[in-house]
Image (cartoon, rainbow, N blue to C red):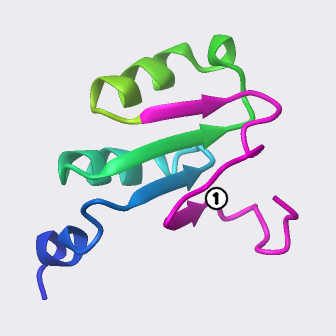
Amino acid sequence: MLLKDYLQQYRGKRIYVLGLGVSNRPLVRLLCEAGLDVTACDRAERADIPETAAELEACGAKLRLGRDYLDGAEADLVFRTPVMLPTTPE
């Protein structure tokens, strides 16, 4: 199976990428380039990551930023930063 075929199974799904560090930014771009519904989430405020925020929005990602970035989050598929444990309550 090719990567493009794999990604197509997520069309119409809400995808959240938790954490916008160096390991997840390329993932957000890849998912957006595949035409998927991507929300990029990070506890940093927009003022703390203005270039990253602008770059990810330009490729089509929605952003959830700030201290309460996980409140009410609902997604069909979640990719999390390596430092976020699966036991995180949110």
Q: Quadrant of the C terminus?
A: bottom right
Residue at figure coordinates x 75%, y 61% from the top left: 83
Asked if residue 89 is among those painted magenta in the image, a careful observer would answer yes
Residue 80 lies in quadrant:
bottom right
Residue 11 location (% of width, % of height): 24, 62
Question: 36 or 83, which is in the foreground?
Answer: 36
Does the magenta portion include 78?
A: yes
Q: Is residue 78 above or below residue 5?
A: above
- Residue 42's image quarter? top right
Between residue 35 and residue 22, name the one nearer to us.
35
Residue appearing at x 68%, y 17% in the figure: 48
Identify which amino acid the numbered label 1 is placed on: Thr
Q: Position of residue 40 (x, y in %)?
A: 51, 41
Dot 1 lies on which element? loop
What residue did someone put label 1 on? 81
| Residue at the spot 34% in from the left edge and 48% down from the top edge | 37
Q: Nearer the viewer, residue 61 or 13?
A: 13
Where are the magenta residues, as a range? Answer: 62-90
Say left or right for 77 vs 35. Answer: right
